[in-house]
Amino acid sequence: MYRELDPELFLSIDNSKYFHLQPIYKSLGKMSHGAYQEAVDICTSKFKQAKNKAKSVYLGNLARIYFELDDVDVLNEICKQFTLYSEENTNLLNKYPVFSFYQYYIEGEYNECIKFCKHRLEKYKNKSDKYNLVKLNNYFNLAVSYYKNNDIADAKKWFEKIVLFAPKMHI
C-alpha cells in the first residue's frame, strides 16, 4: 500500500489463507478503496478496545476519513479527542503533525494549510517510495487547501498530479 498505492492489491493480502491484516491497516485499505463506512466501523470499534497510545492511530485514520469527506464538524470532534490524548502524551503531536494541519483547516486558515503542506512536501521530497502514501496525502491536502482558498488553478494542478501519481487510489 505504501509503495504501490494500489488498495485492491493491498486488500487482497487480507484474503489470503496465510495472512490477515491488522485492523488499522485494514481500515487504511478500506479508506483508500473508497469504502469509508467500513473503515469508520473498523476504527470506531477498535478505538473503544484500544489502549491509550493505540487510540491515537485510530483517531488519525478517522480524521483522515472525515477530512476527505469534508465533514468539518466530525473532524473537529476527532481533533478535540486527539487534543485530550495529546495532553496525556506530549509526544503525540510530534508523531501526528497532520493534526496541526486539520486544526488550520477547521479554522479556515487555508494559507496556513498551504504553508504546512509545502513544508511537508519539502521534507519528504527525496524520501524513498515507502513514503508514497505520505506524499500522496500531502498532495491531496495541498490540492484541497488551494481549492478552499479559491486558487482553482493551483488546486487543479495538484489534483491532476494525484491522478498521475496514484490512479488506483480513491482519494
Image (spheres, grey):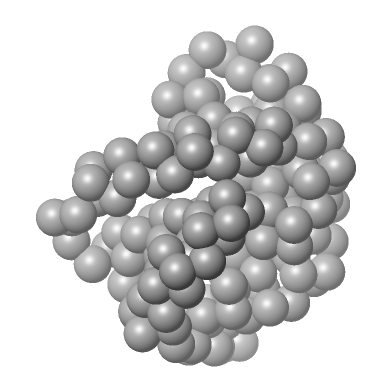
Q: Is residue 120 above or below residue 26?
A: above
Q: Closest to the observer: 56 or 167?
A: 167
Determine the residue located farthest toward the left in the rendered image: 126
For image coordinates 51% across by 24% down, the residue present is: 93
Q: Image quadrant of residue 2?
A: bottom left
Q: Is residue 63 above or below residue 13?
A: above
For image coordinates 54% across by 30% down, the residue present is: 100
For image coordinates 59% across by 64% down, the residue present is: 28
Q: Closest to the observer: 110 or 65?
A: 110
In-image side of 154 versus 102 (left or right) = left
Q: Closest to the observer: 120 or 11?
A: 120
Percent across and percent down for residue 96 are 50, 35
For image coordinates 68% across by 78% down, the residue present is: 34
Camera sees residue 158:
yes
In-image side of 36 versus 88 (left or right) = right
The quadrant of the image that shows the C terminus is bottom right
Q: Closest to the observer: 72 or 54?
A: 72
In-image side of 100 versus 75 (left or right) = left
Percent across and percent down for residue 51 are 70, 31
Q: How many marks?
A: 0
Q: Is residue 11 above or below residue 48?
A: below
Percent across and percent down for residue 5 are 41, 77
Percent across and percent down for residue 94 are 43, 25
